[in-house]
Image: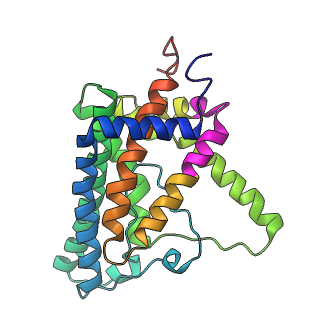
Amino acid sequence: MTPTDRLTATAVLRAAGARVRRAPHLVAPFALAGLVVALADWLRRYDPIPAATPDWVGRTLSIQYSIFPQGTARTVRPVGGLLDLRTPYLVGSVALELVVVLAVGLAGWATITRALGTERRVGSLARYLGVLSAIAIAPRLLGTPSVDVESVLLGVPLVVAFSLVLVHLFALPGLLATGRGFPTALAASARRSRGRRWPLFWLVVVFGVASWGLARVPMAGGFLSTALVGPIHAVSLAVLVERTEPPSRSDE
């Protein structure tokens, strides 16, 4: 039986944890990114431009999962708060969001490539940051979207469909970091999820709940969710990429 046949969520997490214990420096990029996330939270809270607290903060349970390894901020800047701002304030607010995305993007790419031991190329970094920006910037500006479904008959199919999307995209960041182009990485991520949907689903739940739980800590939540969940998520992606690599590399 090959390692890919035995792939489980527990096995991936154990392998990621063991790798981080052997190489503690893997935590450093996300520790620095966590400081940026925490600083951004502080700036949003105390500067004169309106910011909001996400509704998940008061929920009994929430899954704050990000396709790309990153933390969960305790504040969001609604797009309405940017309307009619004078140019210096508008530029400053947008720059703050871009700096956060850049910090977590660099941390994720650096951690994945270091864990994989792959060559670091500017092209793979550009693709990684580009896709991350497309996914992350809009929610950061518009606020974390939430869907409250009253009907169980409607809610269950919606949750299943959304979960399948996340599962199929799970390996995408790791594949982008290895240098694959976006279309190739997207198709390969979907292929690698086949026969592994339940393990990937449970990884989504674990990372999403952990990020939510740590982010709820007053003041330090943004730092904790980034510095603790981010590196384990990133190294888990490296483990997944290694253990699901086809012998013929047919997903190139």
- Count of numbered tags: 0
Nearest the viewer among 184 and 101 is: 101
The image quadrant of residue 128 is top left
**Residue 171 is at least partly visible in this image:** no
Residue farthest to the left?
Answer: 88
Residue at 46% over, 20% down:
252
**Residue 240 is at least partly visible in this image:** yes
Nearest the viewer among 190 and 181 is: 190
Nearest the viewer among 184 and 208 is: 208
Residue 180: image x %, image y %? 39, 28
Q: Main secondary structure of the magenta part?
A: helix
Q: Quadrant of the N terminus?
A: top right
Q: Which region of the structure is painted magenta?
A: 190-204
Asked if residue 193 lies in the magenta stretch, the reply is: yes
Q: Would you place residue 204 above or below residue 245 in this image?
A: below
Residue at 23% over, 48% down:
28
Residue 62: image x %, image y %? 57, 68
Residue at 43% over, 54% down:
135
The image quadrant of residue 84 is bottom left
Residue 177: image x %, image y %? 35, 34
Q: On the picture, is 192 further left or further right than 228?
A: right
Residue farthest to the right?
Answer: 153
